[in-house]
Amino acid sequence: MKKVSLLPLIAAVALSTACPDPASNNAGGGNSVNNNRATTQNDNANTNANTNTDPSLTPFTKEDKTVVIVVYDDATTGRRMILAAPDKLKLVKARNERLDFYVINNLDDVLTSLTVAFTGANGDPMDGVGLSFTNVPAGGAQQGRTGRIKAAAADGSYKYTVSTAPAAGPSPTPLDPEIIINRDR
């Protein structure tokens, strides 16, 4: 399988989540109705499941922050690696934000499992259960979405662990990125 550079994809996702939605500055006109309809459809589509194996994947919404997780073989070190971009992310409770995780398997074999679990002393700040991705095909992707920020979640830093189990070969070293929650900014 030919390997491709994931840097342009990661940069595009990071920029798309950092840029404001132009429709949100529109005073009642334009695409605001379409944006609300898309958000409602996304909410309904993910009510009963936290992962999506559809190759089209759900589009971004302004209420969500996106983390891209890539599992790959590093040609320079010869080791399996996990990359999470961004590795530090700020969520705002007043905006009712949640996390979208996009898992990309750039290995030559199936990724039998990948788990995202909040493991820090502050616990899990998100409603719902932890995310678990199973049987991500070689060269494939899956999407998972957390619930909204818990009402009782305090402002501060929350570490989470990304761990994997490929079908063959060694597992990469788990990552421990973080999110930062602020009440209103």
Image (cartoon, rainbow, N blue to C red):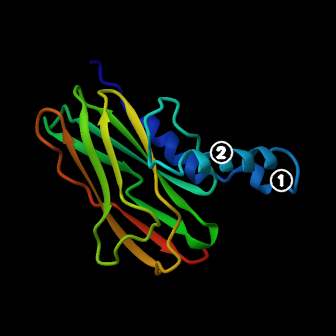
Mark 2 residue type: Gln
Q: Position of residue 92 (x, y in %)?
A: 56, 69
Q: Secondary structure at mark 2?
A: helix
**Residue 99: image location, x then y, percent:** 48, 56
Q: Are marks 2 and 1 in contact (CB under 8 Å)?
A: no
Name the spot of residue 86 as percent of width and height, x first. 42, 53
What residue does disc 2 label? 41
> Label 2 crowding class (10 Å Cα cut-off): few <14, some 14-19, many 20+?
few
Of 68 and 133, nearer the camera is 133
State the CA–CA distance, disc 2 to disc 1. Answer: 21 Å
Task: Depth check: give the residue in front, 94 or 81.
Answer: 94
Q: What amino acid type is highlighted by mark number 1?
A: Asn
Residue 26: mark: 1
Residue 121 in which image quadrant: bottom left
Q: Residues within 10 Å of mark 1 (few under 14, many from 20)?
A: few
Q: For this view, does 20 lie left or right of residue 170?
A: right
Q: Nearer the viewer, residue 174 or 96?
A: 96
**Where's the C terminus, which quadrant?**
bottom right
What residue lies at 43% left-to-right and 78% top-to-bottom?
Answer: 156
Q: Horizontal and vertical percent for residue 57?
A: 51, 36
- Left or right: 76, with 16 as reference point: left
Q: Which mark is residue 153?
A: none
Query: Image check: 51 left or right of 163?
Result: right
Kindly identify the residue that appears in the image at 80 percent across and 49 percent down. 32
Under tag 1, what secondary structure? loop
